[in-house]
Amino acid sequence: MTSLPNLEHLWMPFSANRDFKSAPRLMNEAEGMYYKKQDGTPVLDGTAGLWCCNAGHSHEKIVHAIQDQAAKLDFAPSFQMGHPLGFEAAEKLLSIAPSNDFQYVFFTNSGSESVDTALKIALGYQQHVGNPEKKILIGRNRAYHGVGFGGISLGGLPYNKTHFSLLNNVDHICDTHNPEKNAFSKGQPDWGKELADDLLKVIEKHGADQIAAFITEPVAGSTGVLIPPKGYLDRIRQICTEYNILLIFDEVITGFGRLGDPFAAQHFNVEPDIITCAKGLTSGTVPMGAVIVKKEIYDAFQQRDPKVIDLFHGYTYSAHPLASAAMIAALDVYSNDGLFKHANTLSPYWEEKCHSLKGTDHIIDIRNLGLVAGIEMAPRDEKPGTRGYNVFTDAFHNHNLLIRITGDTIALSPPLIAEKEHIDIIIETLRTIIPSH
């Protein structure tokens, strides 16, 4: 058995560091649907890594693309310079965008960076088109938009805001989670479209002439898999259009086949003005994010002297050569292997199996759409989150299953290569272990 590394000096993100280091959960290898522990024990991946490994692990074509690119061009400066693959990657990504109106891509390194970039672009756009008073940004309660200062300010998770100063000129509308009305809904809930009108209350509060943009996850993932009610996103789009507010879809989780389409915008047939993405963009192989914008937004920044920088923003590793190669290969794999179609084909079985857990002790709600599901468990008295954490650790240590938990909700999002037998293992394992906690 491989010996443990020294665990002391790594401060792990979003982790109970002391508990982890007392009983570490280490992955040593990965292929297809499985990780491997240090002793070689396979672990079924029920979460696509962290919502990102949509093509499964170590896909040969993506791996080779990264290896070949590393040997050819390891890095090129991204400020005032470029390399051909970055431009090719942008064109490739736009080929699956919701419409031809989307004509430009700004590359980042993560979902958090994509969100903060999108917010900056939205504010800059309003300035350029003659709306200098439009400085307020609107998000939703119980939303997650990464960990940049913009993301935590527009997000709605209290713990993420602890200790940190937040942006001014930010407000929130209500979320759509209502178990009394929608518990155990299959797909989109029937009730809740009217909750979109909470945006009208915020508009009335501040004035439409003060609001630059509204950002939302089409399906909220890290906050517990919240599925939008039928007609909700359509109504949000209608309101934003009416009051000249940019609509940003945070598709860091929903992009690249999670709902069976390239983006949730296509799944819901609702077109935003800006899309943020990451995670599945490279199938998790190399850090990369992107902001996709419509031509009119890009053009608004191009009115000055052509030799002057048009957007004072960027990252050293924007359109990194290895990330660009990985992204192009990942999108080829999604297309050539038919993974979005496979996700669509598999989703009815996924829904059936997930909802078969109804009636299991402690489960109070099940939510699903595409190949994503949230299984909400009743919190323990005065100890919210402990049931979820114990199910999570039990699944890994004793049942060799990787799941994700957010509070007392289990979030499931298997790689798009999953088959029915993998779904059966995930669901039957949860059926076994949840009642014991």
Image: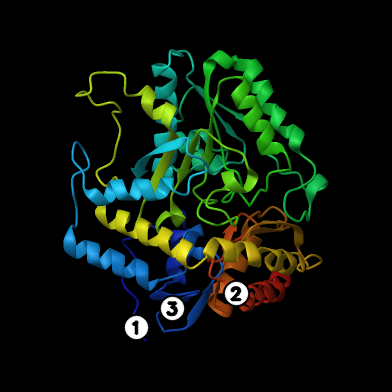
The spot of residue 25 in percent (x, y) is 46, 71
Q: Please identify the quarter of the rendering in which residue 197 is found.
A: top right
Q: Earlier in the sequence, mark 1 or mark 2?
A: 1
Q: Residues within 10 Å of mark 1 (few under 14, many from 20)?
A: few
Task: Determine which quarter of the picture holds residue 157.
Answer: top right
Q: CA distance from mark 3 to mark 1?
A: 10 Å
Reading the image, the residue beneath label 2 is 419
The amino acid pointed to by label 2 is: Glu
Identify the element where label 3 is drawn. loop
**Residue at image x 40%, y 71%?**
59
Residue 70 % position (x, y): 21, 62
Of discs 3 and 1, which sits in the foreground? 3
Q: Is residue 212 above or below residue 395?
A: above
* Residue, disc 3: 37
Q: Which residue is mark 1?
A: 2
What amino acid is at disc 1? Thr
Front-lying residue, 10 or 124:
124
Give the alpha-carbon distance from disc 1 to disc 2, as whole Å: 31 Å
